[in-house]
Structures are given as C-alpha cells and as structure tokens.
Image: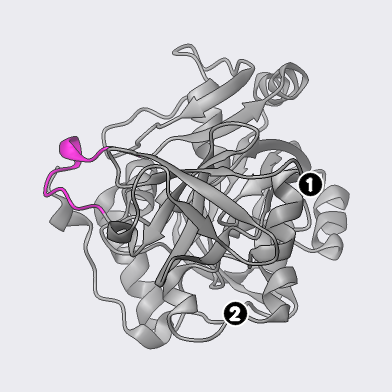
C-alpha cells in the first residue's frame, strides 16, 4: 500500500509533553461498531464486559541513552536491542566518527568497544569490564524519552516515574509501552470489581519503534525486530478466556504484536520466546486479539498502519481527525483510544 495513505495533519500543540494527572484522567476515544464516543480512561470498566481480559506488557524501560566521547568526537548513543550479556545494538549520533574497534568513553567508568554495523544503520557496542551492564547504565545512562518530547523540553526527574508503567518489572525496553501508562492501582481495582481480568507478557520495546517509514510502499519497509516472551501458562489462560466467550484486549501495540506472533492460524495462542518483526498492515487477519487500548500514533508510522488494519483505514482517519478537532493529546504522554472491531 502507498505509505501516503497513512498520512494526516497534526498540529504540534497536540503533542503531549507531560502525562495527565492522575494518569487515568486521560481522555479515551472509544471506536466500535456504534461509532465514536468521547470518554476518559477511568471509564474503561464500563466500556468493557465481565469476562474480558486485558493483556499488559511488563517490560521496564532502562536508562538507554548515553553521551560519550571517542577522542574529541562527541558520540550520542541510544541502545536498541540486546544481543548478548555485554553486547547491545544502538543507534548513534555522529556514527561517521566511529570505526570498528574504537573505544567510546561514556564517563562514570563506563566504556564500550565499537563493533559491526547493521543493515538498519545501527552499531554494535560491547561494554567493557565485569560489572553487569545494568549497573553501568544506571551510572551513565538516562531515560530515553521519545524524540518528539526530548526535542521540545529537557528530560527531568519526573520522567523516571512518568515513563514507567505500574506493571514494569522486566528490564530491557528502551521505550515505554505507553498505552499502559494510563493505568493506576485505583483503575485496576475498578476493573477487577467489574469482572475484567488482566495478564502480562514481555516485549522489550526497541528504539526502532521511532524510526520513520522511508519506503513509499509498505511492502518495501523492513520492520525492526524486538524480543518477547509469552509463557505457556499465560497462553493457556488467554485461550480459556476466548473459549468461554470473553475477549482478549491488548493494552498497547506491543502486547498485540506479541500475541499475534504467538497465535496460530486456528486462533490458538501458543507459548512464544524470541524475536518478532511482525508488520501489520491493512489486509492482515487478526487471530489472537479482540480489541486494543492504544495511544494516538504518528502519521505514516507502522503503528498507525496497525490500527488501520484493525479498524479500517477510512475509519481511523476519521477517528484521528475527530481527535485533532476535539483537542485530544497525541503520542507517548497523550490520550488513549479503545478500539473494538
């Protein structure tokens, strides 16, 4: 499909620079068979049915942005994907100044050797020393806010909490599964009281989620890979939900992509552990999910393509036009949508 079909106009003032307070006070556009309705995330228990199951991503964002030096050259690094105990692949600012075997000093007694370059332009780094890389990043790294936020304000101490979900327990993401940022303990209690359950899986979101689609046709876009895990017990419980007539509602496109990666042609969700580079565009037949809670995505992005596949391109273009007109807040710290095909 022509990538231009997924474009839309978004005024810059619609990009949220801080989350709503409290988190579940964010607005929520419900798009379903009855049309569209303006709600709030706190209304979610009334918008779902007893027996439904929400599926959250429990990945935890790590301090994945590093500033270093190789000689006189300043090097900016955003970690992307772990490839080994001490090896990470990263996107690099000023990468032309690096050669294989160079050592980049990130300060705080943290350094890494430059490795090979990937087809996606990323660079491999092998961290020196014997301390766990997680400890090194705590010393030298900072929270990797999306470029459309970091480019408009300086990240600060608030972001360390604002950019983690209440489910975050498995370190490894370099971007938050932002749909789950709206959820609070109070909202979870209300959902439980309404008979709506929840499960978790893990998908370590990579920096590739922010890469622009440079191809003019979706068939020519190479999707980035991310590591995920959905265990057998969770798969069994999700299958049981659908067998008794409940709906599996993914919270975030990351949860959706992993469930669909784990799902067979017959709609049975199986255990999964490994990389997924699933790229969902209109024409895709969804097998494992029955709905989606997600934020409002970038024009021409793979995520807007995904929601268009779920709900229909014309419908999502109309929904996004409504959201812009009604003052919804977009992107990672913005408002939510509940999509029920």
Tell me, yes or no, whether the highlighted magenta stretch contains residue 222.
Answer: yes
Image quadrant for the N terminus? top left
Q: Mark 1 points at which residue?
A: 169
What percent of the width, then of the height, locates residue 101? Answer: 42, 43
Q: Is residue 4 left or right of residue 241?
A: left
Residue at the image position 61 percent from the left and 22 percent from the top? 273
Viewer-nearest residue: 149 or 13? 149
Write down the region rendered in magenta. 213-223
Tell me, yes or no, if residue 288 can be seen here: no
Residue at the image position 58 percent from the left and 63 percent from the top? 106
Which quadrant would residue 111 be assigned to in this image? bottom right
Marks 1,2: beta carbons within 8 A: no
Image quadrant for the C terminus? top left
Query: Does label 1 or label 2 sit earlier along the sequence?
Result: 2
Question: Mark 2: which secondary structure?
Answer: loop
Viewer-nearest residue: 297 or 290? 297
Kindly identify which numbered label has been placed on residue 288. Answer: none
Helix, strand or loop: magenta stretch:
loop
Question: Mark 1: which secondary structure?
Answer: loop
What percent of the width, then of the height, locates residue 73? Answer: 39, 70
Q: Is residue 225 left or right of residue 181?
A: left
Viewer-nearest residue: 47 or 312? 312
Tell me, yes or no, whether the highlighted magenta stretch contains residue 185.
Answer: no
Which quadrant would residue 107 be assigned to in this image? bottom right
Q: Name the residue under label 2.
A: 155
């Amino acid at each position: 499909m022509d990538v231009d079909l997924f474009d839309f106009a978004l005024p810059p003032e619609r990009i949220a620079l801080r989350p709503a307070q409290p988190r579940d006070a964010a607005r929520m556009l419900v798009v379903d068979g009855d049309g569209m309705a303006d709600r709030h995330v706190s209304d979610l228990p009334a918008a779902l049915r007893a027996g439904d199951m929400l599926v959250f991503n429990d990945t935890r964002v790590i301090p994945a942005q590093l500033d270093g030096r190789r000689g006189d050259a300043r090097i900016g690094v955003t970690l992307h994907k772990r490839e080994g105990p001490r090896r990470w692949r990263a996107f690099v600012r000023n990468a032309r100044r690096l050669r294989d075997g160079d050592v980049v000093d990130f300060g705080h007694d943290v350094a890494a050797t430059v490795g090979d370059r990937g087809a996606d332009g990323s660079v491999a780094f092998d961290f020196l020393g014997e301390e766990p890389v997680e400890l090194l990043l705590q010393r030298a790294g900072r929270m990797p806010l999306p470029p459309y936020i970091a480019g408009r304000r300086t990240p600060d101490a608030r972001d360390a909490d604002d950019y983690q979900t209440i489910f975050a327990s498995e370190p490894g993401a370099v971007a938050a599964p932002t749909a789950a940022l709206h959820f609070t303990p109070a909202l979870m209690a209300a959902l439980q009281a309404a008979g709506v359950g929840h499960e978790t899986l893990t998908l370590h979101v990579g920096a590739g989620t922010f890469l622009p689609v440079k191809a003019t046709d979706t068939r020519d876009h190479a999707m980035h890979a991310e590591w995920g895990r959905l265990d057998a017990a969770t798969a069994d419980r999700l299958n049981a939900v659908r067998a008794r007539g409940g709906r599996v509602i993914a919270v975030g496109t990351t949860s959706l992509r992993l469930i669909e990666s784990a799902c067979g042609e017959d709609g049975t969700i199986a255990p999964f552990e490994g990389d997924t580079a699933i790229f969902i565009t209109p024409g895709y037949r969804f097998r494992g999910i029955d709905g989606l809670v997600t934020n409002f995505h970038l024009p021409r992005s793979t995520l807007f393509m995904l929601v268009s596949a779920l709900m229909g391109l014309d419908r999502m273009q109309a929904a996004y036009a409504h959201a812009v007109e009604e003052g919804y807040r977009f992107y990672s710290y913005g408002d939510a949508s509940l999509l029920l095909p």
